[in-house]
Amino acid sequence: MSMAPGPYAPPAGMPAVDYAKKAGNMQLMGILSIVFALCPCCGGLIALILGIVVLVQSQSVLAMLAQVGSPPELVGKVNTGKTCAIVGLVLVALGTIGTGLVNVAGLLNR
């Protein structure tokens, strides 16, 4: 007995909704890593975690997308997330180095 796709099934040729959600989540987390990297309080820690998660998961998401033909819009979202995650991690590193330098300069002025 074969079942026809339900009313919420994606049209023929379109990737499953799960792939689209994962690609969108990669893009969102990458962008949020930049936003949190600019927050002065504890945003650096959140940005660090988000950036690492995006970089670790992006390869598996790209591999899953390759199985369905690598839809350009979804691959673009994952690549945008990776790029934003790298920028967020660089901002966290620069903020950490800058904070360290300011603290050292403050200690030297005493």
Image: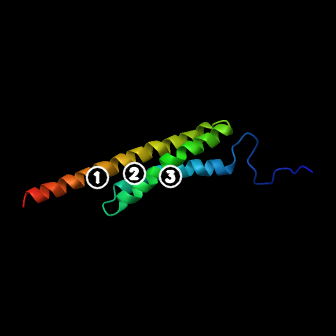
The kind of residue on which mark 1 rests is Gly
Residue at the spot x=76%, y=41% of the render? Answer: 12
| Residue 94 placement (x, y as % from top left) | 29, 48
- Classify 34 as above or below 64: below
Farthest residue, direction left = 110
Farthest residue, direction bottom = 41
The Cα atoms of the two marked residues, 2 and 3, are separated by 10 Å
Crowding at mark 1 (Cα within 10 Å: few <14, some 14-19, many 20+): some
Q: What residue would you read off at disc 1? A: 95
Select label 1 or label 2 by which is in front: 1
Whether the residues at callouts 1 and 3 have beta carbons within 8 Å, the answer is no
Q: What residue would you read off at disc 2? A: 34
Residue at the spot x=57%, y=39% of the render? Answer: 75
Q: Secondary structure at mark 1?
A: helix
- Classify 36 as above or below 14: below
Counting residues from the start of the chain, the first of labels 1 and 3 encountered is 3
Select label 1 or label 3 by which is in front: 1
| Residue 36 placement (x, y as % from top left) | 38, 57
Crowding at mark 2 (Cα within 10 Å: few <14, some 14-19, many 20+): many
Residue at the spot x=7%, y=58% of the render? Answer: 109
Left/right of residue 77 with respect to residue 110 in the rendered view: right
Q: Secondary structure at mark 2?
A: helix
Q: What residue would you read off at disc 3? A: 28
| Residue 61 placement (x, y as % from top left) | 59, 45
Left/right of residue 77 with respect to residue 47 in the rendered view: right
Counting residues from the start of the chain, the first of labels 1 and 2 encountered is 2
Which sits in the foreground, 35 or 55?
55
Which sits in the foreground, 106 or 23?
106
Left/right of residue 78 with respect to residue 20 in the rendered view: left
| Residue 45 placement (x, y as % from top left) | 38, 59
The kind of residue on which mark 3 rests is Leu
